[in-house]
């Protein structure tokens, strides 16, 4: 299909987080790039900031996909989860001409500068804990959360084999507290597919969707019974990957070398 998906992991994880998902999509004809954010994996010693994240994505795109050529449509889809989705809004704003669309997971809660008291309290708590807990203690807390969830899809390979990195938790908060999705989304001239679990915090998912500039090709899918780890819950993985495939077909650009899919926009925006 000559389409590349750039996967950006959540806070504390690494590029291993979506390796099985990328492998499954490879069998459907898609190419994937999995990267480590600053402060994680191979970049564990690099300071995490919004600009360092933009720099990382820009460098990898230029190296692996080449620089932007005038008149040539993008064949790249941004895929970000949790922290990778929240900073993804900023990355997409700064590198908007590099992407044909975006898939954003676990970002239905407004945690930006205009968020509510509950979100502000959550960010404050995360910042305080990250400054006082060791990486070992944070890893134990993450394992406890995973054990209480239904996450069972390559969970060891995705979350533990690649290592987990909590040393810059306060920097995550700085980034999320700075980004205002409601202001950025209307400036993005690309369709966006949002994924959330019904049991996750998500006070702004419909607002994010309504602000999409390319509303007709944008959509929201909520997985009933899923929590923050739904993308590693085998009950939902196949459906999630199918939605990604249909979403890309529905973009209707020349990137597919075929006619626009009939299953686009409004039809599969219905929440099931």
Image (spheres, rainbow, N blue to C red):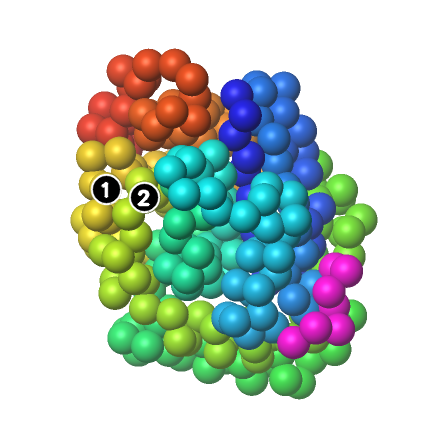
Residue located at (32% from left, 44% from top): 190
Nearer to us in this view, 154 or 97: 97
What kind of element bears circle 2?
loop
Q: Which residue is mark 1?
A: 214
Q: Is residue 163 left or right of residue 93?
A: right
Report which residue position mark 2 lands on.
190
Mark 1 and mark 2 in contact? Answer it, CB < 8 Å: yes
Q: How many marks?
A: 2
User: Residue at point 77% right, 51% down?
Assistant: 162
Residue 173 x, y percent position in the rendering: 50, 75
Q: At x 63% / y 84%, what residue is drawn? A: 131
- Residue 42 highlighted magenta (yes or no): yes
Q: Secondary structure at mark 1?
A: loop
Question: Which residue in the rendered view is the most extreme toward the front?
Answer: 70
| Label 1 to label 2: alpha-carbon separation | 6 Å
Q: Position of residue 3 (x, y in %)?
A: 52, 30
**Which span of residues is magenta-colored?**
41-47
């Amino acid at each position: 299909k000559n389409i590349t998906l750039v996967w950006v992991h959540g806070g504390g994880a690494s590029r291993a987080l979506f390796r099985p998902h990328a492998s499954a999509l490879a069998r459907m004809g898609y190419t994937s790039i999995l990267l480590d954010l600053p402060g994680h994996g191979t970049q564990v010693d690099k300071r995490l900031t919004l600009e360092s994240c933009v720099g990382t994505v820009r460098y990898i795109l230029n190296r692996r996909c080449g620089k932007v050529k005038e008149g040539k449509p993008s064949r790249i889809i941004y895929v970000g989860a949790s922290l990778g989705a929240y900073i993804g809004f900023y990355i997409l704003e700064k590198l908007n001409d590099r992407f044909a669309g975006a898939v954003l997971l676990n970002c239905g809660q407004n945690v930006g500068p205009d968020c509510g008291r509950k979100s502000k309290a959550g960010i404050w708590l995360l910042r305080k804990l990250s400054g006082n807990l060791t990486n070992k203690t944070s890893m134990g807390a993450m394992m406890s959360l995973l054990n209480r969830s239904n996450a069972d899809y390559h969970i060891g390979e995705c979350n533990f084999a690649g290592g987990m990195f909590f040393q810059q938790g306060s920097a995550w908060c700085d980034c999320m507290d700075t980004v205002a999705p409601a202001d950025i989304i209307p400036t993005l001239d690309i369709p966006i597919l949002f994924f959330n679990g019904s049991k996750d915090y998500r006070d702004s998912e419909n607002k994010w969707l309504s602000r999409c500039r390319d509303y007709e090709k944008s959509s929201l899918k909520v997985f009933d019974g899923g929590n923050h780890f739904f993308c590693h819950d085998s009950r939902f993985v196949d459906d999630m990957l199918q939605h990604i495939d249909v979403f890309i077909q529905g973009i209707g650009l020349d990137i597919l070398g075929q006619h626009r899919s009939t299953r686009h926009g409004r039809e599969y925006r219905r929440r099931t």
